[in-house]
Amino acid sequence: MSSKRSWRLLGRAVVVCVLATALPLACTSSGIVGGGCRTGLSECDGVCVDLSSDEANCGSCGNACAAGVECVAGVCGGDASVDAGNDASLDGGNDATADGGSDAQSDAGDSGVDASDASTDASDASTDASDASTDASDASTDASDASTDASDAAADAADACVPPFDTPARCGDCFTSCTSAEPVCAAVDGGFACVPLCTPPLEDCSGTCVDKQTDPDNCGGCGIRCVTRVCQAGSCVGSRVGHVVSMCMDLDVHPKDSMQQLLFTNAVTLPPGFGAVTVLGWDQYATQPHKVDVAQVVGDAQTNSGRTLNLTTVNDYTLIPAQLNVSSVQVLVVYDQTQAPTGELATAGAALQASLDAFTQGGGVVITLSGGTGEMDQFLSQSGLLALTGMTEVTGQLLHNRAPGDAVGLNVLTPFVAPRTSCTFQTTVTPSSLDVFVIRDQPAPSVGEPTVVHRIRQP
């Protein structure tokens, strides 16, 4: 531009300002022209300001940015949309021509930065949303915990340890719990204490207090029932009676329908009930033919009675006591021990006396066989089964059923001929209701001597 043209333009400007002094609100530093601000400026308290960049009036009058913060496009600190919006339009206009494109390049670079910032802001927004969701979940959990705490507090309040401390869980104080040995919390000495369920002499049987000395359902122990319903001193009264049947005949002659067979059948089936009967036979000093005969007699008795009879034998009398238990053996048959050494049967009788007594008093049955020879009388005396002074053979003589109502004499005909190897006992026992002379060698009213004696042993 020539210097002449420059001076002309300057002169025009001076003329304009001189003319303006004659008008109201002439050209001033405030920028108000003819009562208004020029284009791009806004009036704030009588002063024309650029709201897009004025840090004291950023975006609107009076909106001052914080110290050190610039006002960019009417926003304190700037806005990512500025360069992509109005500034781009401006730069694409007169400024673009004036800047020769340099501002456009600069703005393009700013636009890339702003886009990156926008992406970052979007990521931050997503993170913030996630954090907000987490916070909401935490808030829900806190609310649930608060509800649980409230419930626990209510339970604790309801379960508060307060007097009178009268439950098994808190008996007497907050810290005492009753045990199985003393399960009851009862009033004791003005307070509460754990005590046994039952007070002596009562005892606990499955939660019920009973007197085991007298209770027929718990006699001597829980669950021990007396069939007679009588319990005295812890023992059932009225147990089954035992029996001793002494036969002065060895049954070597034993037709199935004979009277001696019927007498034995009645004796071996004395144990009550309809179940099987276990018979233990002691045959230690018996002859082999006699052993066979006894086995046959037991078999015929089973056929005649209809009851099962299980026979086992033992050949050593010292083994007998361990087997004499009524629950496993109901009948002991003592064979005619004709081959026993002298004095051996007396020794055996004395050794077995206590066991035989206990067995018969407990309800067992003992049957002894004798043919009138040997030392069976000594065995009977020493064992306590039947006190004898001797035996007399009566083979072929008439024998009489003197107790047809007795269990052993039941259905036995009278009189009948004594079979071979039959005898009578000479005894000091006096006939009675418990010592029955079933078969004798004399009819009534004669006394006579017994061939079969049935002794009833009470418990």
Image (cartoon, rainbow, N blue to C red):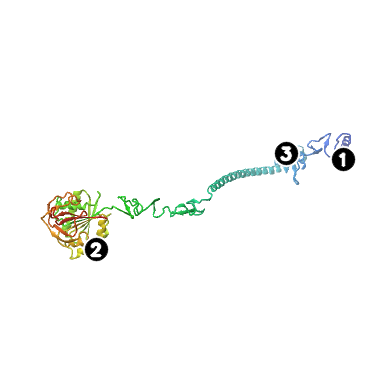
Q: Which residue, as the protein is rendered here, is positioned at the far bottom?
A: 342
The answer to whether any part of residue 346 appears in the image is: yes
- Tell me the quadrant of the picture where the N terminus can be found: top right
- Counting labels gives 3
Q: Which residue, as the protein is rendered here, is positioned at the far left?
A: 396
Q: 262 or 423, which is in the foreground?
A: 423
Confirm or deny contact between disc 1 and disc 3 (CB under 8 A): no
- Tell me the quadrant of the picture where the C terminus can be found: bottom left
Quadrant hosting residue 373? bottom left
Quadrant hosting residue 144? top right
Could you tell whether 254 is left or right of 164 in the image? left
Residue 88 is labelled as 3
Quadrant hosting residue 375? bottom left
**Mark 1 to mark 2: distance in Å?**
166 Å
Q: Earlier in the sequence, mark 3 or mark 2?
A: 3
Q: Earlier in the sequence, mark 1 or mark 2?
A: 1
Residue 3 is labelled as 1
- Packing grade of label 2 (10 A; few <14, some 14-19, many >=20) is some
- Packing grade of label 3 (10 A; few <14, some 14-19, many >=20) is some
Q: Position of residue 257 (x, y in %)?
A: 14, 50
Could you tell whether 440 is left or right of 93 in the image? left
**Mark 3 to mark 2: distance in Å?**
135 Å
Q: Nearer the viewer, mark 1 or mark 3?
A: 3
Amino acid found under the numbered disc labelled 2 = Ala
Q: Residue at x 69, y 44 (%)?
A: 113
Amino acid found under the numbered disc labelled 3 = Ala
Name the residue that disc number 2 marks. Answer: 351
The answer to whether any part of residue 249 appears in the image is: no
- Packing grade of label 1 (10 A; few <14, some 14-19, many >=20) is few
Amino acid found under the numbered disc labelled 1 = Ser
